[in-house]
Image (spheres, rainbow, N blue to C red):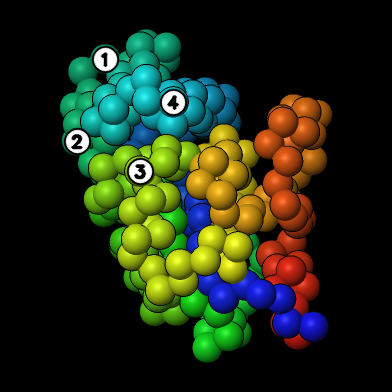
Amino acid sequence: MRSGFTTVLWDVDNTLLDFSYSQRHSLAECFRSIGREMKEEELALYAQINDDYWRRLELGEVTKKQLLTGRFVLLFQKLGIKGVDVEGFRDNYQKGLGSYFSFLDDSLTICKSLQGKVRQYVITNGVTSSQKTKLELSGLADVMDGIFISEEIGSPKPQKPFFDYCLGHIEEKDKSRILIVGDSLTSDIKGGIQAGIPVCWYRRKAGAMDIELSAGYRPDYEISDLHMVYDILGLPH
């Protein structure tokens, strides 16, 4: 039975595309450019620093500019790396993020199959240059009805101005007929709940902290595979 949803707002990183894959390959390439082979513990340290900066951005504690450079300044401090052009390293990293991509759950095929059945948009906090390149190279840009990037809007998920902007620029005006699909409880799910839009939490890996957090955010739907979206939309696989 067809649901009432007419519109899907997709998160990108770790929802449609595997951000961990892009991050690993781009950072390794940047490390090689300064004469180092990246170690697993260095990747883990960067991921921790990066995640912390993005959480602080969501809370309004840092700006996007502070995030983009600050995470590498802190990484180099902790690793004792000196004499590196941080801004050049940062720029190369962002270019790499746009070049390396890997689909999750055959996401491109899913999005293609939904064309003409629901309207689809991207909602992302990623850096504009990286996200646009990645969406174009992956083919996802071709199947979307619109792309909303927080850097262009001037406000990140989960903040209200971001979702107000999106709602003002999509055809569907009835919030109950819009579905947000994303992996981040603090960004996609929290933002959608605050905006009064139904939310679907894409939880690929179960964890005690995730379970504890989800109790506070209470997503409307929870999936472990993107193919499960068909059932929520009431469409055949």
Q: Which mark is residue 59?
A: 4
**Residue sitting nearer the eye, 9 or 168:** 168
Q: Residue 127 at what x, y percent from top left? A: 32, 46
What kind of element bears circle 3? helix
User: In this rendering, which labeled residue sits more in front, label 2 or label 1?
Assistant: 2
Q: CA distance from mark 2 to mark 4?
A: 27 Å
Please state which of residues 135 and 38 is positioned toward the viewer in this rendering: 135
Q: Residue at x 53, y 84 (%)?
A: 115
Which residue, given by chain and number where applicable, does mark 1 sit on? 82
Residue highlighted by disc 3: 161
For disc 2, the marked residue is: 88
* 169 or 144, nearer to the observer: 169
In the picture, the quarter occupied by the N terminus is bottom right
Give, as a three-letter code, the residue at label 2: Gly
User: How far apart, in angstroms, are the residues tagged by discs 2 and 3?
Assistant: 32 Å
Q: Where in the figure is residue 53, as x and y percent of width and height? A: 42, 25
Assess whether mark 3 and mark 1 are in contact (beta carbons under 8 angstroms). Answer: no
Q: CA distance from mark 4 to mark 1?
A: 31 Å
3D distance between C-alphas at marks 4 and 3: 13 Å
